[in-house]
Image: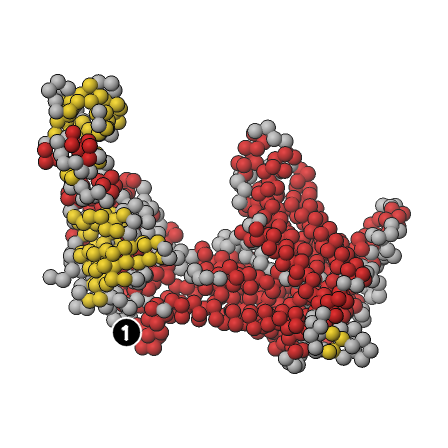
Amino acid sequence: MRADRAPWWLGALAGGGLLFLHGPILLIFAYAFSTEDSSFTWPPPGLTLRWFGAAWERPDIWEALGLSLRVALVSTAVALVLGTLCAAAVARTRFFGREVVSLLVILPIALPGIITGIALRSAFNLADIPFSFWTIVLGHATFCVVVVHNNAVARFRRMSGSLIEASMDLGATYGQTLRHVILPNIATALLAGGMLAFALSFDEVIVTTFTAGNQATLPIWMLEELVRPRERPVTNVVAMVVVLVTALPILAAYHLTRGTDTVAGSGK
Amino acid sequence: MTSAVSFRGVSRHFGEVRAVDGVDLDIAEGEFFAMLGPSGSGKTTCLRLVAGFEAPDDGEIRLFGEPVAGLPPYRRAVNTVFQDYALFPHLSVLDNVAYGLMISGVGKAERRRRAEEALGMMALPGYGARRPSELSGGQRQRVALARALVNRPRVLLLDEPLGALDLKLREQMQDELKALQRKVGITFLLVTHDQGEALSMADRVAVFDRGRLQQVGTPAEVYGRPRTRFVADFVGSGNVLAPELARAFGGAAAWTSLRPEALRLVAPEGAALAGTVMAARYLGAATRVAVALPQGEVAVLVPGGQAVPEAGTRVGLAWEAGALHPMEAA
Amino acid sequence: MTAAAAGAARGGVAGRLSDLLWRRPSVLLALLLGPPLLWLGLVYLGSLGALLVQSFFSIDEFSGVIDRTPTLRTWGELLRPANLDIIARTVLMAALVTGASVVVAFPIAYYAARYARGRWKAAFYLGVMLPLWSSYLVKVYAWKLILAKEGIVGWGFESVGLGWLLEAFLSVPGIGGNSLSVSPTGTFLVFVHVWLPFMILPIQAALERVPGSLVEASADLGASPGRTFRHVLWPLALPGVVAGSIFTFSLTLGDYIIPQIIGTSARFIGLAVYQYQGTAGNVPLAAAFAVVPIAVMGLYLWGAKRMGAFDAM
């Protein structure tokens, strides 16, 4: 579209909307430094760094963080393999039922998370599978596939279809074509998809409550603090750190796909 | 001598569509061969069958006498120049050209030397370090040619290689491709929808329509003696006379082709046929004049320098008896 | 000389496998599709199946033991007035949230698609992406801080001398409460905030495809901005709006955390599912309840697909 000057009221509405999106998150930062320790008084009566030390000393936070990181890593790895395979099939070949496969991939994210959660729980229940690290991963990988898939499909579609033919025409087998042509061309899309999948898994709570049993990932730890607050200032600090940590993979993914794919993360 | 490429009863269907329908064809070694036809005529599918990107549903294709059924593209001694060039965007120009050599295990120094030599031959010396995205359309095309030829294929397949270039560059590349083919001496198989391209470069031309081979012959044969109405219509812009009109010209009662340049305008008095000038279109080197006869309309090419009659003028027509070519009805 | 070029790398197992894949493209497709379909089919569809099966079990109200003989009793229970209330309340909330999201999202998406350029475009994009991906719980938590009685909203109203206005608003039955953080208005605000990015991105994607000249042409033909919006922009943006509404609608239908943290004790579908399977231990009823959003979303997706909404995703 052509760039011309926007009417002032449109700018104001857009700016107001963005403020509505960002303001609350930024507010957390102020609370993390507040000296007030029992209520949500605004403005903060004073500023302190005390709560950062307090959070650092808490073993339960470290444990939850560790579990979240491990779950996110394994789920991302599974999602990378499954999402890429599926994207290759959907984008590069024509077959009967292609639409059904696309639908199946987005279903875990299009249907409310609580359904995925309770469905998995019902299945574990019926099959007598006890809750473990792997039951969490099973759920997370399922809804992370779509993120990798969307990123990879976008890149495959942009890749000229004749590149693979050209490689084979020049003497390369499927294996050599995969290594020398396909992987180098989709690498950044996979990296971006992987980072978004990681962020998605790291933050997930709705499905996790149904698949974790009494294990606590970091979001579950936070949820418990929200329902039954124990030490509010520590929760403030953890919330701020979570915002900062999840922003990193998103910014990285953006830089990896900038100027190539349009809306890399819109498939959350 | 065995042919470089031979088709025997080759068919390829996509669902209900017969993309290639019972094609028989022999292409000689060292020949510049063009497959000509409108889009969807099956010419590109034929090229893809030779390259190995498609497999025939029926019939047999041989390369230098050997059947290639079951051989993937990487086991065929042919290389392709793609319509969109298909240069690898993640590799430099030099690595693109050296790709085939790298795959077949040629040492680093050797493949670098040969790739640079190929770029030199394509008038692109010193471009090796660039990315394909930094090149112009014409330069990309030369890289695609170098990348294919560096592997010393026995047949070079060219899929609409000039389609993406502008007119001036296209004409220049036609001469260069022809010269290149003479220099390397291998078989070139060109697919194009542009009859000018096919006629100016190829030793022989095959004309396709709806998956079927219409005619194979030298450019002069295909142009001057079209075998079917389709060929006469598609190749050049000749007159296709309906049986009735052909009879008026003294021919048999059959569909007949008559090239506009074989007709001359003469005085209407005493001419075998006379009609009225409807319109004239100036083409530069000649003027194309439409003449209405009682039995139908014909086009006459008046060479530059001669007087062009105005619309409404009555004119007579003259021609050599040998200029009429009766055709098959198809 | 042979027509077949036989390089060293093309021999061996890898070469033979490659040959097989070339000759049998269906094997290649099966290798690509097999693992993801197996996973999604087994883990996901299998679980959905298990969920459906559970909804035909029933619970013994006295012993709390689940009876595994198939029955429609649980489904009958779903139709009790209290449960129908929950469904109606949830669908109403989802519709309101979706409507409000469209209103707030449209100016942002339109500005980003039509006026933002270069650095600003990137800033807008990240300005939507970061909140989309940043922690859901943190956002909910932030609103608890904001809407608390002593929080920033109350403070804002007090400091401009409008505390009475907030009090008056909170005393309206149906939308008010003790404080904003325990009112339906609070629940609504948080839903809109949390799902808003899901609405902005598809609308923006749809608007990006509208050439600016189209808007100018409409203005040129004498249409007022309002008419241009109604007859040109809105129809073209509609697929994006529908795509976005799939998210806002679906996410609201299934959420059980926001109404639990911010809002009255009135239950929503997600919360009901959560509580039935948790504290009440009535997994069959929870399962039957969970089928409701699936059915609603199924209808919704089917309608959206017919409108071509998936092209904008």
- What kind of residue is marked 1? Ala
Q: Is residue C249 left or right of residue C113?
A: right
Can residue A88 be spotted in the picture? no
Q: Secondary structure at mark 1?
A: helix
Q: In the image, what residue occupies the spot 62% across and 71% down?
A: C49
Q: Residues within 10 Å of mark 1 (few under 14, many from 20)?
A: few
Q: Is residue B288 above or below residue A166?
A: above
Q: Position of residue B42 (x, y in %)?
A: 29, 52
The quadrant of the image that shows the N terminus of chain C is: bottom left
Q: Position of residue A14 (x, y in %)?
A: 66, 45
Provide the chain ID for the residue under circle 1.
Answer: C
Q: Is residue B98 left or right of residue A25?
A: left
Q: Position of residue A127 (x, y in %)?
A: 63, 80
Label total for image: 1
Q: In the image, what residue occupies the spot 54% across and 33% down?
A: C217
The quadrant of the image that shows the C terminus of chain C is: bottom right
Q: Dividing the picture into quarters, in which one does residue B1 lie? A: bottom left
Q: Is residue B294 above or below residue A174?
A: above
The way the protein has been coloured in the rendering is secondary structure
Q: Position of residue A83 (x, y in %)?
A: 51, 66
Q: In the image, what residue occupies the spot 34% across and 61% down?
A: A165
Q: Dividing the picture into quarters, in which one does residue C24 lie? A: bottom left
Residue behind mark 1: C8
The front one of C239 and B294 is B294
The front one of B55 and A50 is B55
Q: In the image, what residue occupies the spot 57% across and 33% down?
A: C218
Q: Is residue B93 left or right of residue A136?
A: left
Q: Dividing the picture into quarters, in which one does residue B15 lie? A: bottom left
